[in-house]
Amino acid sequence: MNDARTGLELRIDETAQQAFSSTLAAARTAQSGSDAEHLANAWKCAYGRDPDPSKAYSEAIKAWSRPPRPVIEPSKAKATLGSSLER
């Protein structure tokens, strides 16, 4: 059970969990409001008690599609999903 008691996370690699947690924390401190919400929802839909892969994908895209994108590509003012995939 996760800390928020909203889903099971025992099957998730610890490195992935730490990466998600630090990215979510950075998104919240970057004042990207709904970006952090979309990211949290994506994680819950992917790894929560009742997984919904389609919604997880949709939420992840919504989290990335809105500016600013300081967490993934802080040096690019006009970062796109495509440019982040090139990394």
Image (tube, rainbow, N blue to C red):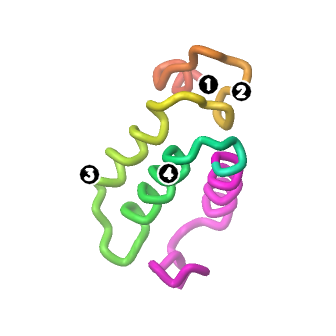
Please name the amino acid that badge 4 sits on: Leu
Magenta span of residues: 1-27
Comes first in the chain, label 1 or label 2: 2
* SS label for mark 1: loop
Please state which of the two labelled residues, at mark 3 or mark 2, is closer to the viewer: 2
Comes first in the chain, label 4 or label 3: 4
Please name the amino acid that badge 2 sits on: Pro
* Cα distance in 3D space between marks 1 and 4: 20 Å
In the picture, the quarter occupied by the C terminus is top right
Seen in the picture, residue 76 relative to 18 is either above or below; the reply is above
Comes first in the chain, label 1 or label 4: 4
User: In the image, which disc is placed on residue 74?
Assistant: 2
Q: Is residue 69 left or right of 43 when viewed as pictured?
A: right
Crowding at dot 1, Cα within 10 Å, few <14 / some 14-19 / many 20+, comes out as few
Residue underneath mark 1: 87
* Cα distance in 3D space between marks 4 and 3: 14 Å
User: In the image, which disc is placed on residue 39?
Assistant: 4
* Cα distance in 3D space between marks 3 and 1: 24 Å
* Cα distance in 3D space between marks 1 and 2: 13 Å
Q: Is residue 13 left or right of 63 when viewed as pictured?
A: right
User: In the image, which disc is placed on residue 54?
Assistant: 3
From the top left corner, tell me how far across and down residue 39 is, in percent: 50, 51
Residue at the location (51% across, 84% down)? 5
Crowding at dot 2, Cα within 10 Å, few <14 / some 14-19 / many 20+, comes out as few
Please state which of the two labelled residues, at mark 1 or mark 4, is closer to the viewer: 4
Residue at the location (73% across, 20% down)? 75
Residue at the location (71% across, 27% down)? 74
